[in-house]
Image: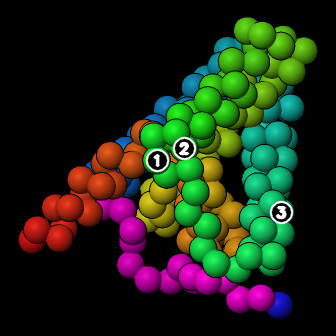
Amino acid sequence: MIEPAITVKGPRRIGPAGTVARAAVGTVLVGSVVWGHVRSGVDPWPWILGLGVFPAVITTWQWRRARRTPARLVALTGPGGHATTFVVFMALYLTSWYAPAVSALSDAALLFGGTTMLVAALRGHAGCEVLAISNWVLGRDDQVGCLLFDPIDRTERRRRRET
């Protein structure tokens, strides 16, 4: 078995503002799906996809990648990378507009994104929340860029260095 390049057992990698931002956005995303399903009826597919399939696919991909290349993954962190992660999320979220047959992906994306943000807030995980669950399961600290939280994390890191 190949050991991960970095095992996460140390201090939190995000500060209070990053934690609150992730918790707030995650709560809004998950809450919007819960509220919609309370009002309109529960569709099980978004829950199965968002809380089961998406995390399993990403964890499997990350595990396989780490077996081939055990070094820590830091990718899509520049402006182009941030745009890429945003476009992928929006493509899933907007399926009800352009592909109604797979519109369950919209709520699934909200559930997955919101849940991973809550996990990242609880664990103090920096970077894009997409890898928060798989990092937790695999004991890694891989990261991809995040348009929403990167500016907050950078500001907090800079302030910590100044004090």
| Local secondary structure at mark 3 | helix
- What residue type is disc 1 on? Gly
Question: Observer-nearest residue: 63 or 35?
Answer: 63
Point out residue 9 in the picture as x, y percentages from the top left corner. Answer: 50, 83
Hey, what amino acid is under mark 3? Answer: Thr
Q: Quadrant of residue 140?
A: bottom right
Residue at the (55%, 63%) spot, across then down: 74
Above or below for 149 versus 135: above
Discs 3/2, front: 2
Q: Whole-percent x and y of residue 36? A: 65, 19
Q: Residues within 10 Å of mark 3 (few under 14, many from 20)?
A: some
At 52% from the left and 39% from the top, the residue drawn is 80
Residue assigned mark 1? 78
Q: Amino acid at mark 2?
A: Gly
- Can I make out residue 118 in this image? no
Residue 32 horizontal side relative to residue 12, left or right: right
Residues drawn in magenta? 2-16
Q: Position of residue 49 (x, y in %)?
A: 82, 40
SS of the residue under disc 1? loop
Circle 2 SS class: helix
> What separation in Å lies between label 3 and label 1 (alpha carbons)?
25 Å
Q: Residue at x 45, y 40 (%)?
A: 79
Q: Within 10 Å of the Cα at label 2, are there few (<14), some (14-19), or many (20+) other Cα atoms?
A: some
Q: Are marks 1 and 2 in contact (CB under 8 Å)?
A: yes
